[in-house]
Amino acid sequence: MAEMLNDFFVSVFTEKSGGVPNVVNTSRERVSLEDRIHKEQVKNHLGKLDVSKSPGPDEMHPRILKELIEEVSEPLDMIFEKSWQTGEIPEDWKRANIVPIYKKGNKNNPGNYRPVSLTSVTGKIMEQVIKEIICKHLEGNKVIGNSQHGFVKNKTCQTNLIAFFDRITSLVDKGEAVDVIYLDFSKAFDTVSHDILIDKLGKYNLDRATIRWVHNWLDKHSQRVVVNGAKSCWKGITSGVPQGSVLGPVLFNIFINDIDIMIESTLIKFADDTKLGGVATSLEDRDIIQNDLSKLEKWSEVNRMRFNKEKCKVLHLGRNNQFHTYKMGSDCLGRSMAERDLGVIVDHKLNMSQQCDAVAKKANMILGCINRCVVSKTREVILPLYSAPVRPQLEYCV
């Protein structure tokens, strides 16, 4: 089982070109000698370690590091600073135990599992340090566009939905026909091209040391799948940002940041969850949406990140909607009467009854489980159980 899953997970990777991208050698130097990693910074990250988390392939448990915080802070600071300066990365930091997380469907189908990486704890601390360096640059230079709501400070699923549907519902209220296209990438995180990503880091003017470190961290990464104690053989990783890593989300945001350049319709993202919407009242309106879809298709070809066109769906809104058929490449996109958008069911009438029914059903299931499993029905016992698993279901994106 472990070997079969690993074979499947590596089969989705895209090919990697040889050599070192030119940007690694031509990007700007670090700003100053003061721009370095500090012992207190490392100590702070060690203090925040979750001792309940599993170790990576090096089997260095977070509990050990946390208990020895005074002893290991300084040597780790020296190792991290040297790694950042030179770009040299210990092999243990580039290895991952993959835990397959079941999603839904046939349990014998490898495609119904999500690969989550367990990596070296010390490597993850270094990732945190590099992430802080990258995020400071991104925020200071306002690199990530406003359309991205995933893994961005002060933005959430709720801000994503509000930003998009405030625009869409106002158009429908004015009597306009509106078409919303829910876009689906095929294995988005696993197919990020390392070479293209490194070029984009240079384009956004990150310093040479950080770009070189990220390049070497991604290069010659390897993984094995662990299932019930059984371990597969090690296999090389040629593309993607590891799911479960610290750096993965921020690197993915950088990679996908330029997808909405020259797009005229409203485009909103939450990591790879992307939707496009616009007025569809006239033929000219629908041509704008179609042209935007063609631009997105071109972006996917240039960046080697394919859309799963069978899962891309069109939601037609408004009374006078012509139910136009849109294409991506030569493929016609299917229509949908309702779509689950970041956990919220949106139907073609913008009626929330399906969402309310689904939420009430789930909350009642949890309440039923609590009722069957909990002997004591006192307020002190029931109230926390209601507040933790039940109430969030009812209040999500309300």
Image (cartoon, helix red, strand yellow):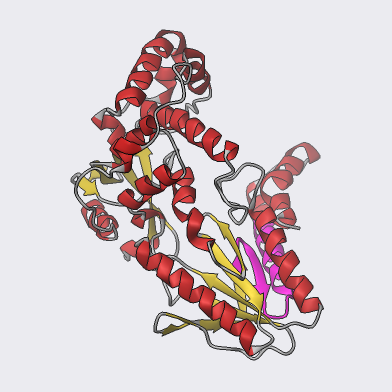
The picture places residue 256, in percent across and down from the top left corner, at: 47, 55
Residue 9's place in the image compared with 38, above or below, is below
Q: Residue at x 45, y 13 (%)?
A: 69
Residue 22 occupies which quadrant of the picture? top left
The picture places residue 26, in percent across and down from the top left corner, at: 33, 37
Residue 240's place in the image compared with 92, above or below, is below
Residue 367 occupies which quadrant of the picture? bottom right
Give left or right: position of 123 versus 67. Answer: left
Give left or right: position of 179 versus 319. Answer: left
Q: Residue at x 45, y 19 (%)?
A: 36
Start and end of the magenta stretch? Answer: 340-368
- Count of labels shown? 0
- Camera-side residue: 292 or 251? 292
Q: Residue at x 55, y 33 (%)?
A: 136
For the C terminus, which image quadrant? bottom right
The picture places residue 127, in percent across and down from the top left corner, at: 42, 32
Q: Residue at x 68, y 44 (%)?
A: 388
Q: Is residue 375 magenta?
A: no
Looking at the image, the residue that sits furthest to the top is 71
Q: Is residue 362 magenta?
A: yes
Q: Is residue 241 visible?
A: no
Residue 160's place in the image compared with 328, above or below, is above
Give left or right: position of 377 versus 65. Answer: right
For the N terminus, which image quadrant? bottom left
Q: Is residue 278 visible?
A: yes
- Camera-side residue: 4 or 166? 166
The picture places residue 100, in percent across and down from the top left corner, at: 36, 51
